[in-house]
């Protein structure tokens, strides 16, 4: 599912024009990665919300094997995991330095 989400939610260059659901994103697209242009903030987060795929691939969530749908409903602003809480109030987003205070 990650590869399918990336086809719309990534800054990318088309390589083949033949992507189908189930294919690997990287077989069909070249991903634009964080660099020193104004596309990304200095910490690697993307400036435009719709293009978060590259930032996600470098995140703690990706390395923990989470998928987009583990926390988000597709194509809505709803996050059923948050249930009205700020993202920084969620256990998975609690920064270790904050928990010591």
Image: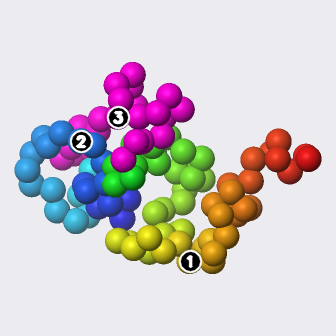
Residue 81 shown in magenta: no
Residue at which label 3 appears: 39
- Discs 1, 2 touching: Cβ within 8 Å: no
Q: Nearer the viewer, residue 37 or 3?
A: 37
Q: Which residues are magenta?
A: 26-48
72 left or right, relative to 4: right
Q: Which residue is mark 1?
A: 80
Which secondary structure is most common in the magenta stretch?
loop
Colour setting: rainbow
Position of the N terminus by quadrant? bottom left
Farthest residue, direction right: 101
Q: Earlier in the sequence, mark 1 or mark 3?
A: 3
| Inter-mark Cα distance, 1 to 3 | 29 Å
Label 3: element kind? loop
Q: Left or right: 2 with respect to 32?
A: right
- On residue 62, which mark appears? none
Disc number lying in front (2 or 3):
3
């Amino acid at each position: 599912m990650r590869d399918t989400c990336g086809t719309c939610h990534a800054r990318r260059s088309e390589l083949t024009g033949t992507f189908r659901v189930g294919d690997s994103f990287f077989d069909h697209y070249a991903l634009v990665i964080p660099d020193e242009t104004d596309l990304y903030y200095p910490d690697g987060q993307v400036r435009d919300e719709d293009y978060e795929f590259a930032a996600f691939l470098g995140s703690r969530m990706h390395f923990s094997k989470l998928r987009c749908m583990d926390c988000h409903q597709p194509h809505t602003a709803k996050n059923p995991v948050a249930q009205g809480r700020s993202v920084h109030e969620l256990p998975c987003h609690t920064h270790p330095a904050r928990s010591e205070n």
